[in-house]
Image (spheres, rainbow, N blue to C red):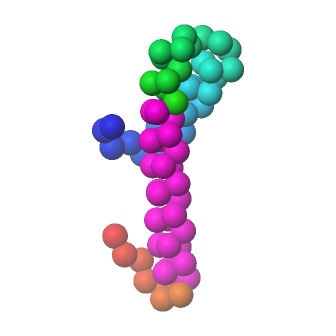
Amino acid sequence: MEKKNYSDAMKQLEDIVRRMESGELDIDSLTKELKTAQSLIKLCKDKLYKTEEEINKIMETGEITK
């Protein structure tokens, strides 16, 4: 999967959920989309975790790092 930012990943997840809920996906597509969704969820969780760590570090030290 190419690198995505959080917003793009969330938009793609929302699209997958919409298509699942509408019954738009056949069983083969559903399997593929579920795997994609799983990867996107992991990406989002990782980005949120990293951001939380950075915020905590800033709060503790007052320093912003890149």
Relative to residue 47, is residue 41 depicted above or below?
Answer: above
Q: Is residue 12 visible?
A: no
Q: Residue at x 49, y 85 (%)?
A: 62
Where is residue 34 drawn, in percent x and y? 52, 30
Q: Residue at x 55, y 33 (%)?
A: 13
Where is residue 59 drawn, in percent x and y? 55, 82
Closest to the observer: 19 or 27?
27
Where is residue 21 drawn, in percent x and y? 68, 20
Q: Residue at x 54, y 78 (%)?
A: 56
Quadrant into which the N terminus falls: top left
- The quadrant in which residue 4 appears is top left
Relative to residue 20, is residue 38 depicted above or below?
Answer: below
> Magenta residues?
35-59
| Residue 47, magenta (yes or no) | yes
Q: Is residue 4 left or right of residue 38?
A: left
| Residue 42, magenta (yes or no) | yes
Magenta span main SS: helix
Q: Residue at x 57, y 25 (%)?
A: 15
Closest to the observer: 53 or 58?
53
- The quadrant in which residue 18 appears is top right
**How many marks do you count on the picture?**
0
Closest to the observer: 30 or 66?
30
Where is residue 65 drawn, in percent x and y? 37, 75
Relative to residue 28, is residue 3 depicted above or below?
Answer: below
Q: Residue furthest right?
A: 21
Q: Is residue 33 visible?
A: yes
- The quadrant in which residue 66 appears is bottom left
Q: Residue furthest left?
A: 2
Q: Residue furthest bottom?
A: 61
